[in-house]
Image: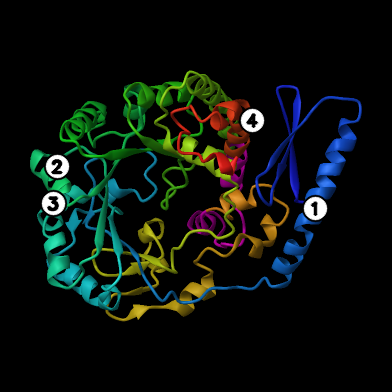
Amino acid sequence: MNTTYKQFNIENLTYIFCIEDFEIFKIPHIENDENIIKEIKIKKEKSNSNIDKNNRENLKDDFTKSKIIHTVGIDIANGCTLDCTYCYISAAKKTRRILSKEIFLDILNFLKSEKDHPITFYFTGAGEPTLNFNLLKQLPILCKENGFDKCVYNLTTNGTILTNEMIEFFKLNMFTINISFDGDKKTHDASRIYHNGKGSFEDIYNNLTLLKKNGIKFSCKTTIQPDNKNLVEVFSFFEENKINFIFSIATNSFDNHFLPNINDLKTFEEQLNKVVESYKKLIENNQEIFAEKFINDLKRIHYGQVSKNGCIASRESFFMDIEGSIFPCSYHSSSIDLSVGNIYAGIDYEKIIKNSWYAKPVDNYSACENCWMKYLCTGSCFAIKWLENKNTDVPSDYLCKTYDIYWTAIIKLYTQIYPYITSGNNINFIDLNDENQ
């Protein structure tokens, strides 16, 4: 099977999507349109054949120990104020425990060889990090006292217990804030609930308003369940309230208390197509779009930003729990069996390599060889593949289907709004340079 192109039929028109560089050709419906398609395919195949040949001949398992660890996740608190139905790490079920100052200092000691270059610390994991605000507010000082002068701080919180003191601290220390928030009240309160079953929408929305009043930039992280039949309302909520957000689909939890049904992705596809149609109108009307993922991915297609390598977990990024155990990422941290070392003994790279707990270049995955999305999804999340199949070389059927639905919708939207992207006048694409058209 040839993977140089993918053919789409959109609004009675035929488009050729070139997999190697994301170039899109619109085919006019004339008598010899089949010949035109054939000519384009041959041209693209020839232009990429040498590159493909060289790439495939040189394919190898390229895992190497990173010389630099520049992203460090830290589990600062176990347990959660919420009991979200789809939580992938079942944070609400965990015993309330917090990271101690002593363990954090041990983490810094483990990272001492990295302190001369920038490090991003992100605080998330098996609980709500603001439950340990007493330590959180000491971290910038502790980092500076130990020679870590180039730190950036990123916090993901459910936003339920934010206070004025916290907000002032985040502002003073330039924290990047991400709020887990699922949109309109009906959708949010169906899943993001307190332990007593009460919805958390009002409390979080009020705190979002507080962040806005204090001039703190933040973005919301929204989790979509595949059977959500109110997706248009979710996206409309963020757009009407002018709240930046990114979204992802709910995935398997480690303890299997939440298992999405792949058959529900039919509903997701139907709903996403409605969402895309609404965004087409918003862009045509030159309204600012707050769905960051949509805009970024439309630009990615436009610029042909091909990605052949997956995430940096186990290479340049690791996650550390409250006891100092080390994991490839926060997704793995629910099981101590997935630990790849600790801050006292170091990182067990042999275990990482043996279990393939890292993202290989997508061309190294034989299962991805004939997939038209391979340079869009780069083989998808190896943690989820391990969770589903106990083998990171085997694709997740659920994620693959999700990505197929999503990227098909994005390409459809791109073809429909192309004139607005290239006009130079649309507020969402004003940064595009004419020479890149």
Helix, strand or loop at disc 3? helix
Label 4 – label 2 distance at C-alpha:
42 Å
Q: Which residue is mark 4?
A: 415
Label 2 – label 1 distance at C-alpha:
54 Å
- Residue 199 at what x, y percent from top left? 26, 28
Label 3 – label 1 distance at C-alpha:
56 Å
As shown in the figure, which amino acid type bears the numbered disc 2? Answer: Ile
Of labels 4 and 1, earlier in sequence is 1
Q: Tell me, what colour scheme is on the image? A: rainbow
Residue drawn at x 19%, y 67% as measured from the top left:
104
Classified by dominant secondary structure, the portion drawn in magenta counts as helix
Quadrant, the C terminus: top right
Q: Which residue is mark 3?
A: 133
Label 4 – label 1 distance at C-alpha:
22 Å
Say which of marks 3 and 4 sits in front: 4
Q: Which residue is mark 1?
A: 45
Label 3 – label 4 distance at C-alpha:
47 Å
Q: Which residues are magenta?
A: 381-405
Of labels 3 and 4, earlier in sequence is 3
